[in-house]
Amino acid sequence: MKKPKTTREYIEDQVKTLVRSPECGTTHYNLAIGLIAESRWDEAVEELMAAVNECPTLGEAYVALGGIFFHKGDLDACINFNQRAIAVRPKFAQPYGNLGFAYVQRGDPEGAIEFLEKAVSINPEFIQAYSTLASAYFMQGRLDETIYAANKALDLDPNFAVAHNNLALAYFEKGDHQQAVEHCDKALASGFDVEPKFLKNLEQYR
C-alpha cells in the first residue's frame, strides 16, 4: 500500500508541476492549500492571487483568501474576497456562509441572515451555515427561529457543539431551563467552551 504523502512532499510536487505549467491556476491553488496547512500565510496569498490571475473564475481561491484574511483579523478583506467569490460563482454556497459568519463577528445579524439563508438554500447540508444562522437569529431575539436553525444543524450532526450551545441559550431565554441545561451539557460534552456567566446562571436549575 502506497504511503500517503506528507504536506511537504505535496508542496514539492505542486512546485515541480508549476515549473512545467506556470500558467495553471489550479496548481497555484493546490500549492496554496499545502502552504496554508503549514501556516505559511503570505506565501499562500501569493499563490492564490496567481491562481485567480490565471483562472479568474476559481471561486475556491477567493474563499481561501477570505479565510486567510479572517485568520489575520482583517474582516474587510475577508468580506471582499468572499464577495468576489460570489461574483464569479453565484451558486457556490461557501462564500455566502463565510460572509454570514463575518457579519455575525461584526455584530450585524441582519446582514448575516441574508447571506446565511442563501447559503442553506443552495446547500441544505451546510451545517456551519445553519449553526451561524441560529446565532444570528438569537442576536435578534428570534428564539423560535434560533431553535429551528440549530436543530437543522443537529439533524446533520447530533454532536455539533455550537448548535447545542445555541439551543441552550434560546431555551433559557424562553424559560425552559431543563432543556437549556440538557443542551448546555451536550455542548460541554462535545468540547464547547460555554460562557462561564451562562453556566453560573444555569446552576440553580440543576
Image: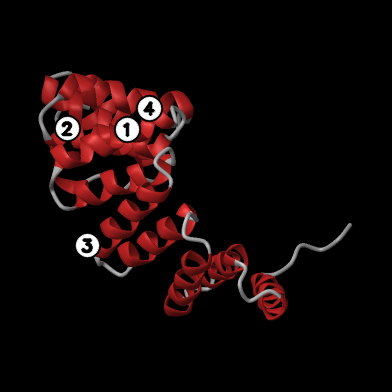
> How far apart are the two marked residues, 3 and 4, measured between alpha carbons?
25 Å
Which residue bears the numbered disc 2?
138
Asked which quadrant contains residue 168, the reply is: top left
Q: Which residue is mark 1?
A: 118
| Disc number placed over residue 76 in the picture, else none | 3
Crowd class of label 4 (few under 14; some 14 to 19; many from 20; radius 10 Å): few
Residue 83 visible in the displayed image? yes
In the image, taking residue 113 as reference, residue 25 lies left or right, namely right
Q: Quadrant of the N terminus?
A: bottom right
Q: Give the farthest residue toward the right.
A: 1
Whichever of callouts 4 and 2 sits on the residue coming sooner in the sequence is 4
Horizontal side, residue 205 vs residue 32: left or right: left
Residue lying at 14% horizontally and 25% vertically, measured from the top left? 142
Locate residue 175, reporting x and y percent. Answer: 12, 20
Q: In the image shown, does 67 or 158 lie closer to the viewer?
A: 67
Total numbered labels placed on residues in the image? 4
